[in-house]
C-alpha cells in the first residue's frame, strides 16, 4: 500500500496560501529562495497567470525590481506569500525592498 504524506514544508506552504486566499483578492507576491538566488513573482490566482517576475542574488534588489515591474503593470497592492519560509533574513529583505519602491504589502 502506497500512501503519500505531506512533508512539513508542504504543510507550511498550504497553511500560508490557504490564509492568503481566504483573506485577499489582491495578486500574490510569492518568494522562492535557493542557495544562491532569490526569485519573486506576482501571480493573479483568479486568472492563473504570472504578472511580473524578478530574480537576483541580492534579495533587496529583487524586492525593488518586482515592485517596479508590478507598478508598471498598475498593481499597487499585493498579498505577500512567504511560502514555507520564516519572515526573516532574505525573505524580509525582499519585502522591505518592495515596500521601499511603493508597493503595499
Image (cartoon, rainbow, N blue to C red):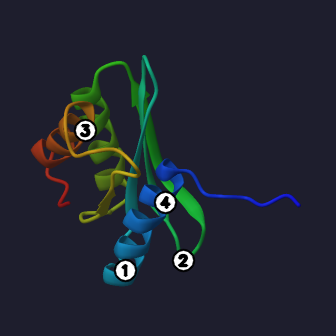
> Contact, CB < 8 Å: mark 2 with mark 1?
yes
The mark tally for this picture is 4
Tell me where residue 103 appears, x and y as whole percent: 19, 55
Q: Earlier in the sequence, mark 4 or mark 1?
A: 4
> Could you classify mark 1 by the number of other residues whose Cα lies within 10 Å: few (under 14), some (14-19), or many (20 or more)?
few
CA gap, disc 4 and disc 3 = 23 Å
Q: Which residue is mark 4?
A: 11
Q: Is residue 105 left or right of residue 62?
A: left
Please, what secondary structure does the residue beneath circle 4 have? helix
> Contact, CB < 8 Å: mark 4 with mark 3?
no
CA gap, disc 2 and disc 1 = 9 Å
Q: Which residue is mark 3?
A: 94
CA gap, disc 1 and disc 3 = 21 Å
Q: Which residue is mark 1?
A: 25
Quadrant (top left, top right, bottom left, bottom right) of the C terminus:
bottom left
Tell me where residue 83 appears, x and y as whole percent: 40, 52
Q: Earlier in the sequence, mark 4 or mark 3?
A: 4
Residue at coordinates 19% horizontally, 38% vertically from top-left? 88
CA gap, disc 4 and disc 2 = 22 Å
Q: To which quarter of the image does residue 98 belong?
A: top left
Q: Front-most of 74 and 9?
A: 9
Amino acid at each position: 500500500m502506497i500512501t503519500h504524506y505531506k512533508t512539513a514544508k508542504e504543510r507550511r506552504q498550504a497553511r500560508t496560501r490557504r490564509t492568503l486566499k481566504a483573506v485577499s483578492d489582491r495578486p500574490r507576491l510569492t518568494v522562492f529562495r535557493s542557495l544562491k538566488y532569490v526569485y519573486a513573482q506576482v501571480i493573479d490566482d483568479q486568472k492563473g497567470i504570472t504578472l511580473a517576475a524578478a530574480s537576483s542574488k541580492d534579495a533587496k534588489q529583487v524586492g525593488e525590481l518586482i515592485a517596479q515591474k508590478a507598478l508598471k503593470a498598475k498593481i499597487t497592492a499585493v498579498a505577500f506569500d512567504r511560502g514555507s519560509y520564516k519572515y526573516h533574513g532574505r525573505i524580509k529583505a525582499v519585502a522591505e525592498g518592495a515596500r521601499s519602491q511603493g508597493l503595499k504589502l
